[in-house]
Amino acid sequence: MFLISIYSIYYTFDIYNITNIVFINNQHTIYIFGIQINSTEFLALLLLGAAFIKSAQLGGHVWLPDSMEAPVPASSLIHSATLVSAGVYLILRFNTLFSATEFTKVLIPVVGSITAAYGGVCAIAQSDIKKTLAYSTISHCGFLMVLCSTQMNEFTILYLYVHGFFKAGVFMCIGNILRISGGYQDTRRMGSLLKYLPFDYFCATIGLLNLAGAPFTFGFFIKHLLLLSLHNHIYIYYFVLFNSSIGAFAGLFYSYRIIFYTFCDFKKGDKSLYNNLNNPSYNSIIYTNTSQGSIFSIFCLFLFAYIIIFIILVYFIDNHSGFSDCFNTTTSSIFYIIYSNFGGFLLNFSYINIFVLLIINYLFWSKFKKTNRYYNYFKLFFSIIILFIYIFIFYNIL
């Protein structure tokens, strides 16, 4: 599809004017087997098909879970930077062309939102830890496609940074888990690894919280920018919003499953595995039983991720302007929603924060022993505090 689209561009368009909306709207036609076809729509369909398969959208996603047979560093590169991001980059580069065709304005958000929901639900049902992350990537690629359809290029680039950096870091932490587990990828053969990999537990938790959109994380911020951007789609707004919300909430559950079943659950592996880990040689003074090079790489990855994303985000908010060289044909009112005032800026994200805190509260308390008397007292106290927070947020919204 991509090869035919290159030939079509060469045959019907001037390559230097491919992003010129005036030039695109000049109706070009081509003939395929004697059938007259609008070249703009034909070219958009080819590029869109190539982008959907490359970015693992529904129907062309089957290659991504199978690529988990690759080593962990290769999987980290595939899921964060190179392969799955290429389709999103293709749509960003030709967004002017897609904005000139009507069917892409509906097809991109519909397919992207369904993919986001499908990937999140499938990730919850996986027991293979790498396949869980693979379906997580499919879900995030769906979110990226939805963002591409909203013409909010800066939000899409921010999402690419957030997903790329933190997914790469999580994969490197999972690689250390697989090495210490003897190569087992099934979470049903893991458990209680927090004692042996506290550094990897800390870094994996940070990465998964950002990917899940937990409060006070970059993932939380960018997912709410995504949901706010959907107001452009008047006719399919509720359908896209519903599927996107399912994918967003599913991220909380599969992220929780990875952390709990791997690090915090009871020992589910062979006794020989844990007997070897209890040897004095595994009592590391650097809070992990992996190599120092791995620790340095993971630490630098997360450090640079926070620095780079924070700088870009502050620049975007302070300057009230875009930082990409991808040109839009429409100006969204989303900027006026965000830049109204500081109070309004915070309240834009309050209603989703309520549901996120409720789910995290449920997941946290569901694993405690209910026979403890102090458990009920503390649970009541904690619930009252959460209730006052919810009342305060609703009061400010109303």
Image (cartoon, grey):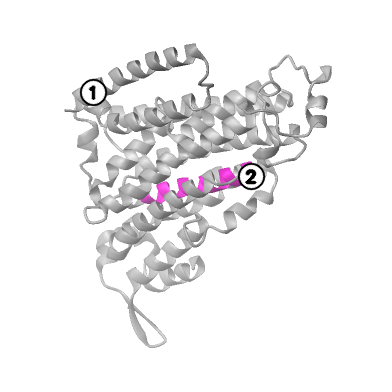
Q: Are marks 2 and 1 in contact (CB under 8 Å)?
A: no
Relative image position of residue 51 (x, y in whole percent): 46, 58
Image quarter of the C terminus: top left
Label 2: state its secondary structure.
Answer: loop
Above or below, 75 against 300 in this view is below
Q: Amino acid at mark 1?
A: Phe
Q: Is residue 366 visible?
A: yes
Mark positioned earlier in the residue sequence (2 or 1):
2
- Checking the image for residue 342, the label placed there is 1
Viewer-nearest residue: 241 or 358: 358
Q: Amino acid at mark 2?
A: Asp
Q: Is residue 81 visible?
A: no
In the image: residue 228, left or right of residue 273: left
- Checking the image for residue 125, the label placed there is none
Q: Residue at x 24, y 37 (%)?
A: 335
The quadrant holding residue 12 is: bottom left
In the image: residue 333, left or right of residue 256: left
Viewer-nearest residue: 1 or 346: 346
The answer to whether residue 355 is magenta is: no
Relative image position of residue 267 (x, y in whole percent): 70, 29
Q: CA distance from mark 2 to mark 1?
A: 43 Å
**Residues packed near mark 2 inside 10 Å, few (<14), some (14 to 19) or many (20 plus):** some
Q: Residue at x 21, y 53 (%)?
A: 234
Q: Residue at x 52, y 15 (%)?
A: 372
In the image: residue 72, left or right of residue 114: right
Viewer-nearest residue: 249 or 364: 364
Above or below, 189 against 366 in this view is below
Span colored in magenta: 128-146
The answer to whether residue 137 is magenta is: yes
The residue at which mark 2 appears reads as 128
Relative image position of residue 217 (x, y in whole percent): 43, 27
